[in-house]
Amino acid sequence: MSSTIQPAETAAASTLITNVEAVRLALHDAMVADERVLILGEDVGVRGNVFLITTGFLEEFGAKRVIDMPLAEASIVGIAVGMAMQGLRPIAEIQFADFIYPAFNQIVGEAAKTRYRSNGDYSCPLVIRTPYGGGVHGALSHSISIEALFYHVPGLKIVAPSTPRDIKGLLTAAIEDPDPVLFLEHKKTYRSVRGDVPEGHFTIPIGKADVKKTGTQATVVSYGYNLHQALDAAAQLETEGISVEVIDLRSIRPMDKTAILTSVRKTRKLLIIHEDNKFGGIGAEISAMVSEEALFDLDAPIRRLCGPDVPAMGYAQPLEEAFMISTERMRAAMQELVQF
Amino acid sequence: MAKTVTARAALDRGGLTDDQLIAMLWNMLLQRQLDNRGFQLNRQGKIPFALGSEGHEALQAGAAMAFARGVDILVPYYRDLGLVLGVGITPLDLLTNMFAREADLSGGRQFPNHYTARDRGVVSISSIIAAHCTHAAGIAYALTYTGESGRAVLCTTGEGSTSQGEWHEAINFSAIHKLPIVFLVENNGWAISTPQSAQMAIRDVADKASGYGLPGMICDGTDPVATYRTMKVAMERARSGGGPTLVEAKCYRFLSHSTDDDDRVYRDRETLAEQRADDPLPKYERVLLEAGIIDDAGLTAMKADVLKQTNTATDEAEALPYPSVDDMTTHVYAGAAYEPWLE
């Protein structure tokens, strides 16, 4: 994976940071800026998180603000919900998205409903961060995508940015948001994607997509690791005279209807790409929305290129590769759609 | 006879004044009246559902007496009608909730017995068993974090909740961080139709504390003074930085789980009749009568007043309007927007 959002020749190398460094930067700045912010999760303290995101935080901010939690995900989120209800700004970390199931009720049944069920008496300004996605030899329980399990839930916000700038801006926005936000970080992009990040405090609004590449003949909507592959595929096609527009969804709930429809009405063709399995995935909702709003603006059936509908990603390399969508498959799908 | 009266006059009042002892009786009478009112209104077809707390009155009056209003925080469960009354929720609040009116604290969204009143220290809960226990631990952590010493969190459950992982997780975390919190288990022996014997292999829930390194205490939940005395120790330990306590109050559940349940299917009438003979309410009335803290006329007047207040609140609540359907989309998020599609 060689994709960088800011081409190396236009930015000083020293300003380029990786996605994982952007996560760390956003967390660090938030901890410095607001004493109500604290981090709780498994191995976030002494170990500095399994991806070394919070290395040094324990020494800098103390054990009261960087809490090594007992190994129990339901209470990592549940205790964070209580802290949030009492006015703190907790950032709960689920070590791998695959481990989030024990916390499902706390996210769906509690955090997302706190404001509603109390008629605004209580709120739950909570961020739940978790690394997701495959392609890192993570096998069944360190590879999954979880967004479709949660995006059905009103009261919850879901963000899945893919570049350092978007991660910094959206994680800062999530921490400052008055409602619970599920913040998804694709781990295959952690160290493979670099980009520049503006100095100082800035936010990117939750719910806004970003056109990462303009084009005229088809629209591709994607996010996560796939977004970078789609950009690579689109760049290859560009050299062959095929022009594809690539939209980075960035936010999954709320989702940017205007950005999708504006692009689709221009290109008249839509391809949705996500690593999560196809049935009931994010692409299904986007497809339904575009069908409802812009069916007669389309020149081709909506296409979805998604993960297979099997329970999990295999450990063996061929199984993993077959699950992940290759850049070549994306390129072929784009080409086919443009030629339809 | 005179000898008995003399003995009663030396009543162990747990350090409570006459007024406080009477306040607990008032609370118990009021909660029974309101509790029964919920079932009556359901049978009259006026409200869809009610939950009963009958049999829990004494422990809830005692626990509420140990709760410092304006200081402590209550994270209750759904069988805490008397406890919430004791910390400042009013009969009108309760009836408005039963009738699901617009003025209800949850705006007519929540089931009966699911309160929210931040201004009175009552935390919003769901019906998911023990999910609120981790919230309570988080709130207690926040109190410590912000340096608010002298405040305690009271988290209540039934004994069935102690089967849930999150109950254990909350207690474990509270013990690790020595949090200012009391976990009160109102053990009435039943989780809907499931008896304690199918819930755990031990007799005393309080024994579960030892595995987590916090004190476990047992009190007679049919005696408000005994419960108060135990809860006072636990709450003061929490407020003074001594860490969490698990308190088990043994009590009865006289009614079915709810108006949708029929306990005749799963428990025998004889045992229930034996328990009824130990009803905490007349028992406490006798204690105060024999100690001369209240007399027959005073008790009769108090009961009449409780009934009158309940009737007044019932009429007032019933006359209130339902929430507007326009309110359905409020408080999904902060601000008015709630749709998942951003335009």
Image (tube, coloured by chain):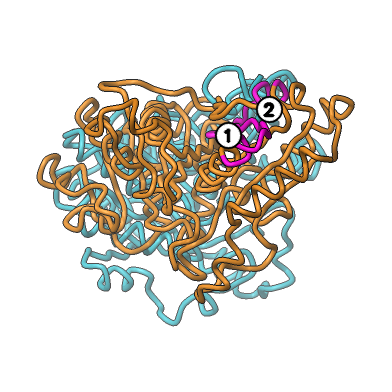
Chain colours: A orange, B cyan
On screen, B332 above or below B162?
above
Label 2 CA crowd tier, 10 Å (few <14, some 14–19, many 20+) = many
Residue under label 1, please give it: A249
Label 1 CA crowd tier, 10 Å (few <14, some 14–19, many 20+) = many
For residue A219, the mark is none
Range of the magenta residues? A236-262
Residue nearer the viewer, A306 or A178: A306
Q: Indicate the chain on which mark 2 is placed.
A: A
On screen, A215 above or below B210?
above
Q: Hey, what amino acid is under mark 2? A: Ile
Residue A28 is a magenta residue: no
Q: Can residue B21 be seen in this view?
A: no
Residue B298 placement (x, y as % from top left): 46, 34
Residue B282 placement (x, y as % from top left): 50, 53
Mark 1: secondary structure: loop
Residue at 70 percent across and 63 percent down: it is A309
Furthest residue to the right? A296
Left/right of residue A194 with respect to residue B82 in the rendered view: left
Furthest residue to the left? A59
Q: What is the number of callouts on the image?
A: 2
Mark 2: secondary structure: helix
Q: Hey, what amino acid is under mark 1? A: Leu
Residue nearer the viewer, A23 or A150: A23
Residue A238 is a magenta residue: yes
Specify which label sits upstream in the sequence, 1 or 2. Answer: 1
